[in-house]
Amino acid sequence: MMPRLIPEQDQVLEMLRRTGAFREGHFVYPSGQHTPHYFQMPLAFRYYDTARVLAVALSRKLRLEKDVSSALPKVSIISPSPGGIPVAFAVREALSAEQIYWAEREEGKRMFRQYVNAGEVHPCVIVDDISRTGTALQETVELVRALGAQVIGCGVIVRFRSSPANLEVPGSDPVPILSLADFDAKWYDDGQSCGECKRDAPVEHVRF
Ligand SMILES: [Zn+2]
């Protein structure tokens, strides 16, 4: 197969649309917020081909970071949650990185399970399928640092433009959050302010 370049943002969104991972419409969340778009990123990663194209593209962007390319293959790919495991797994493979770990939330707190021991973890690249607020990525920085490991890179498939462009890493330079597509998310606090409601667009209630 011919090596593919990193797809343009429009191509990425088209791929997400085709797989159902990105939908446009009129959605209402349990919080009462309304939005004209809905991302369910695992839907893109259920297909081997799509998962591979997206992960290879993200890995190419990561490889362009000198801190990442010079550390490979002794690099850990870290997902902030189990939801990011398909991306982390595919990026690990594309980069030939040696390790993958993922955090989980327990009693409201993000943590690694007992299988992760301080001192064993290579320098880390944090990856996720989507960054809506940047909070999950930033919390993962703290976890990685608590293990005594370094954060050398970060990448997501989709980044909401309202979320930070960098991870703050105490004691070192900020780490840019690389992305394949940047997206202007629209949120309305309620139906009164919602543009879709004004147009009487049919509503779909979503769970999260
Ligand atoms: Zn609405």
Image (tube, grey):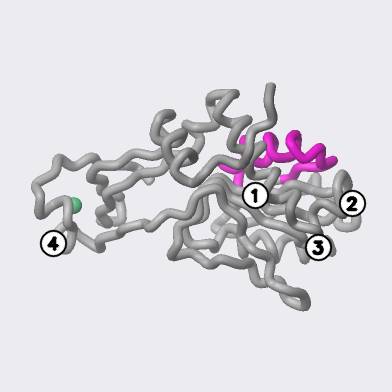
- In which image quadrant can residue 66 be found? bottom right
Give the number of the disc on residue 120: 2
Report if residue 103 is visible in the image: no
Mark 2: which secondary structure? loop
Please name whichever residue, 72 or 148, is drawn nearer the observer in this view of the structure. 72
Main secondary structure type of the part rendered in magenta? helix
Is residue 41 depicted above or below 172 in this figure?
above
Instruction: Report the span colored magenta.
Output: 81-101
Q: Please, what is the three-letter code of the amino acid marked with disc 3?
A: Gln
Report if residue 129 is visible in the image: yes
Disc on the earlier residue, 1 or 2: 2
The alpha-carbon separation of the residues under discs 3 and 2 comes to 12 Å
According to the picture, the residue beneath numbered tag 4 turns out to be 192
Is residue 50 depicted above or below 105 in this figure?
above
Q: Please, what is the three-letter code of the amino acid marked with disc 2?
A: Glu
Give the number of the disc on residue 196: none
Instruction: Kindly indicate whether the residue at mark 2 contacts the one at mark 3 (C-beta within 8 angstroms).
Output: no
Q: Please rate how many residues cluster around mark 4, counting C-alpha atoms within 10 Å: few if below 14, some from 14 to 19, many from 20.
A: few
According to the picture, the residue beneath numbered tag 1 turns out to be 127
Disc on the earlier residue, 4 or 1: 1
Residue under the image location 45 percent in, 57 percent down = 160
Residue under the image location 50 percent in, 49 percent down = 181
The alpha-carbon separation of the residues under discs 1 and 3 comes to 14 Å
Q: Please rate how many residues cluster around mark 2, counting C-alpha atoms within 10 Å: few if below 14, some from 14 to 19, many from 20.
A: few
Mark 4: which secondary structure? helix
Taking the image as shown, residue 112 lies to the left or right of residue 87, namely right
Residue 97 sits inside the magenta stretch? yes
